[in-house]
Image: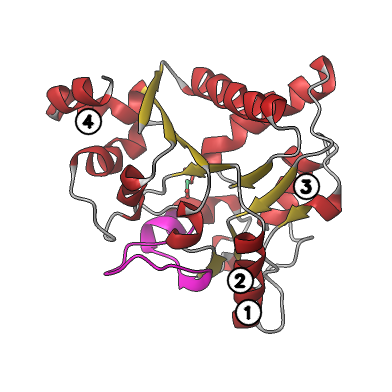
Amino acid sequence: MRLIVAKDYTHLSRIAADKVENQVLLKPDSRIGTVTGASPAGMYLELVRRCQEEGLDFSEVSTVNTDEYAGLSGDHPQSYRYYLDHHFLEPCRIRRERTEVPRGDAKDLEEECRRYETFYRKNPVDLQILGIGHSGHIGFNEPEHYFPEETHMVSLAPETIAANAEYFDDPEQMPAKALTVGIGTLMQAKSILLLVSGKSKAEIVYRFLCGNITPEVPATVLRLHQNVTAVLDEDALSVVRQRAPERLRQLLG
Ligand code: PGA
């Protein structure tokens, strides 16, 4: 794993946008695995700016999103399809037919999980963007006793519900279940860009970087992937810096 330390969130977002831009310059028809949430928001903003002001060209790019709330249709303002359409895909003129998000309003959600898994396996991801949840989740793979391999339905962890409910006008409306690609699916990506920012993530970052590799902290599995770039800001690294300076020096090479 390559670790990059950003001084703050703005810096992290710029580094992340550089990585995506380089990927697209090297391989214009890249497939990018997307996520939503606070971690990549600044990166999307910067990518949209580069598309609109600097001519960054996403016309051959395709995307596939890791997760979606169960029960929300793509026109629900809190759905991940809606977020991506408005904050990344449409402003960067990525054609709709080149984009995939699980259908949260599918009649048969188990069947939708199977469809999505087949799609992901047939269409390899060149660059998978990820964040880490407060629970240690990646995608919506919450702490478990095993690493779930394939796309599946999950019950969201209390920390995840607490963190995400604030995006809903009525927090009670936040779905407690979601569809997510599995850990096995995510680990197939050719490269992974992990973004972590803020003091509220510092404790889970410590467990991610310094603890055992365990499904109880799903993100730890990323330490086994061959091509991960993790961009963390100083706030996110603060507990590691304090409790395990030696480990940090080792990680930074
Ligand atoms: P966040 O979520 O970026 O909103 O902190 C991260 C995640 O849930 O993976």
Q: Which residue is mark 4?
A: 239
- Report, in whole angstroms, how far the alpha carbon at label 1 lies from the one at label 4: 39 Å
Mark nearer the viewer, 1 or 2: 1
- Report, in whole angstroms, how far the alpha carbon at label 4 lies from the one at label 2: 34 Å
Q: Amino acid at mark 3?
A: Asp
Occupied quadrant, residue 244 = top left
Q: Which residue is mark 3?
A: 85
Q: Amino acid at mark 2?
A: Ala
Q: Residue at x 52, y 56 (%)?
A: 165
Residue 91 in the image: state x and y as whole percent. Answer: 82, 35
201 vs 247: above or below: below
Q: Which residue is mark 1?
A: 109
Badge number at residue 70: 2
Magenta segment, principal secondary structure?
loop
Is residue 78 at all visible to an observer of this figure? no
Q: Residue at x 18, y 45 (%)?
A: 211
The C terminus lies in quadrant: top left
Asked whether disc 1 touches disc 2, contact meaning CB atoms under 8 Å apart, the reply is yes
The answer to whether 251 appears left or right of 18 in the picture is left
Q: Element type at marker 4?
A: helix
Residue 54 in the image: state x and y as whole percent. Answer: 80, 15
* Mark closer to the chain start, 1 or 3: 3
Occupied quadrant, residue 238 = top left
The residue stretch that appears in magenta: 139-162
